[in-house]
Image: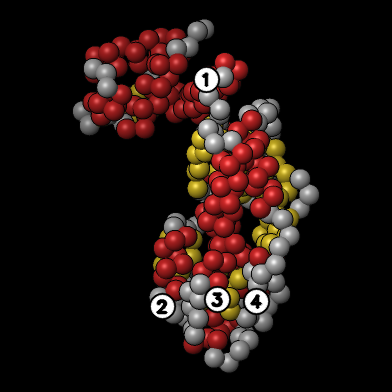
Amino acid sequence: MDLNLREISYFLKVAELGSLGSAAAALAVSQPALSRALKRLEDRLGGELFVRHTLGMDLTAFGDAFVPHARILRADANRTIEDLNLLKGAARGVARIGIVPSAASYLLPPVFDNALRKSPDIQIHVVEAASSQLVAELEYGNVDFAIASAMPAQNSESIAATDLLREQMFVVGRPGHPITAAGRCAIADLLAYPWIVPEKGNAILLKLRRMFLRAGMEPPRASVSANSVHTLKLTVASSDFLTMLPAMGFRREEESGLLQSIDVNVPAAFRDLSVLRRAARPLLPAATLVLSELRKVVAPATGSVQSLIKPTAP
């Protein structure tokens, strides 16, 4: 069975938008041409991909099952083109990296600077997402490697994980927060203030829940949840909200006097980040360079928060 990559791209666009008209406009093709391409793909695969109705198009069970395979096929085709362009000298390469948002602002700026100094013609694309989503992006072939928790990849045979760093987690508030008036506080004192936390499924939220449960207490009810670390930090810096963040997540704000860690009478909590990769695919030169520079950034250093980031052996 021969599959056509253009038809696969058309299929993915219709699956994304749920409308033949919207997909045709986005792809700059006519609706009849798009419809014919989808029909050819269905004939090749031997099953219907969409249910067509007056409001748009929905994936069938067959089509839904084909989506992850289509994404991998498209990503692998794009990587093959990049490989060939590198061999021909027509390009210097593209590095696609995934990273959890709470580590991005600390780790990435020096990585960009150092990598582009060494190879100015490479391109770097970044996907920020929760660890579980980054595992999916890896499996679909959308990123070369990811800096994330290895936990969501434990049952995946296609993902290889290598330890990168361990860092301490902190309860975080604004400087001068009322809870700091008496110095070190008890964990029960934290319940008197509103909390803003990442959305459900985030590793930070899991660490927060464990901290309270280990103390025999119910975790605080989150008044606000957000999938943006930037929104989370701005809210805490301008109010009496509390949150939990890893060391890298607020180091720069601590240095600027916008945020501070809250001294709580509980055992220290830590999170581990790993380098996740597709096990069967070697990294291209651009991605190898970016990963090498990233490991250099995760080196022992000094500083009130940075000293709590412990690199592990590659």
Q: Which residue bears the numbered disc 2?
A: 239
Density class for disc 1 (Cα within 10 Å; few <14, some 14-19, many ≥20) is few
State the separation of the CA atoms marked 1 and 4: 61 Å
N-terminal label among 2 and 4? 4
Q: Which residue bears the numbered disc 1?
A: 90
N-terminal label among 1 and 4? 1
State the separation of the CA atoms marked 3 and 4: 26 Å
Res. 85 visible in picture: yes
Residue for point 58% across, 92% down: 182
Toward the bottom, the furthest residue is 182
Q: Classify 180 as above or below 26.
A: below
State the separation of the CA atoms marked 2 and 3: 13 Å
- Point out residue 185 in the picture as x, y percentages from the top left corner: 61, 86
Assign a secondary structure to mark 3: strand
Residue for point 73% across, 48% down: 163
Q: Which residue bears the numbered disc 3?
A: 260
